[in-house]
Amino acid sequence: YGSMKINQNGHLEIGGCDSLKLAEKYGTPLIVYDVSLIRNRARSFLNAFKQLNINGHVAYASKAFSSVAIFQLINEEGLSLDVVSGGELYTAIKAHIPPKKIHFHGNNKSDEEMEMALDYGIGYFVVDNFHELNRLQSFCQKRGIRQEVLLRMTPGVEAHTHDYILTGQEDSKFGFDLQNGQAEKALELALTQPNLEVKGIHCHIGSQIFETDGFIMAIQKIFTYIERWKEHFSFIPEIVNVGGGFGIRYTDEDQPLEPYKYIEAIGKEIIRQANRIQVPIPEIWIEPGRSLVGDAGTTFYKIGSRKEIHGVRTYISVDGGMSDNIRPALYDAKYEAVVANKMLELPKETVSIAGKACESGDMLIWDISLPQTKAGDLLAVFCTGAYGYSMASNYNRLPRPAVVFVEDGKSQLAIKRESYEDLMKLDVPLYETVK
Ligand code: LLP
């Protein structure tokens, strides 16, 4: 991947940095991001729009991995930012993301979150439901402002992915349903709100998608309705946002397309549909998360104990696990790994990689071929850059790992390792002194 290679010591190197030295300097578990890969991915989405001569816009879905450093990097590359909570929004503001470049998502935005977003003057609310629509109108009226919004629609398209990360199907908690007239009511209402300006439509069909047909179907559905709304309300969307969901390669089973291929399919279909119903071609927005940061992240763990069950399995335990990567336990997600200090050694045995949490389900990888390992070796698990740190927990009071950015032979701390003191920060003792 990206800037990864094997150096002359037989060690895995990322961004020109020897991974053993990184582990020594920053400790383990350690999440290392290949910055040039993130830049390249961001640029390939932007360039795809340029090459196709499409007025496109890319927002990073920050839920995939949010921190001040990644937000700064994303901003440097000219992307906007999609946030889904007050916490992500606050982080974006602290990272000095221009508020106009922030889009606010979510199916249950609180009053406080909405007021905060209005205080900062963010670019767009992606309005998810009637409760939000009504409150947003009244907050904006009180402030005497007009807020630009997109309306999130549920297109009723099922992308082929894990049930938990499906979002575009009809039976979903997100958005206004197209099928049953809900979306039409929402649009009609929004268009009559004096303090809301409906700029366009949003939809998101799911995550880790390898094909373009789901996007195409969603676009076709949406335009069927836009055609109607053009007649009924003279509504013409200036923006059509098709969400994120572009897949990455975790293992050989995954066959994602190049960013260009997704954008080409989406762009061509939107142009075709806009021409069909005779409206100007809207701005096309996408919101990739995983495909910007997923395969740029690698987690390094120190190998510890070993348990052999003769004829059954060998468990190798590492110093992290479900607390820094819940995806195998939650989604049955598959990962590949190597022994970073033994890159030139041939596979010797099949082992299963266990995390250190007190939970049998805390397994990172089942049945992987690795060289002979011993305690102290450094295991590198690939493609952990999306929904790893951002879904991390302190289960068993395990401190969260450090995050490092590497590029051109330089490494830089992006998130400090959590300390035991950090873990205690919010605790309020019942007694100040021992009784
Ligand atoms: N836009 C919206 C409205 C979304 O809900 C999502 C993801 C994205 C964009 C970004 O999708 P991406 O490009 O990253 O696939 N925790 C799960 C993934 C949940 C995705 C939620 N929404 C996982 O670890 O696979």
Image: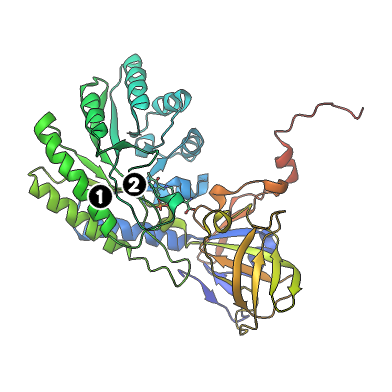
- Kindly state the secondary structure of the residue where label 2 is placed: loop
Left or right, residue 286 beside residue 110: left
The yes-or-no answer for disc 2 within 8 Å of ligand 1 is no
Does the rendering let one see residue 309? yes
Relative image position of residue 143 (x, y in whole percent): 35, 17
Left or right, residue 52 beside residue 167: left
User: Which amino acid, mark 1?
Assistant: Ala
Name the disc covering residue 168, or none: 2
Residue found 37% across the figure and 19% down from its top: 139
Q: Name the residue furthest top.
A: 142
Relative image position of residue 193 (x, y in whole percent): 24, 21
| Distance Cα–Cα, label 1 vs label 2 | 8 Å
The correct choice, above or below, for 229 with respect to 272 in the image is above
Colouring mode (rainbow / by chain / secondary structure / one colour): rainbow
Relative image position of residue 249 (x, y in whole percent): 43, 66
Q: Name the residue furthest right.
A: 435
- Report the residue marked by disc 1: 218
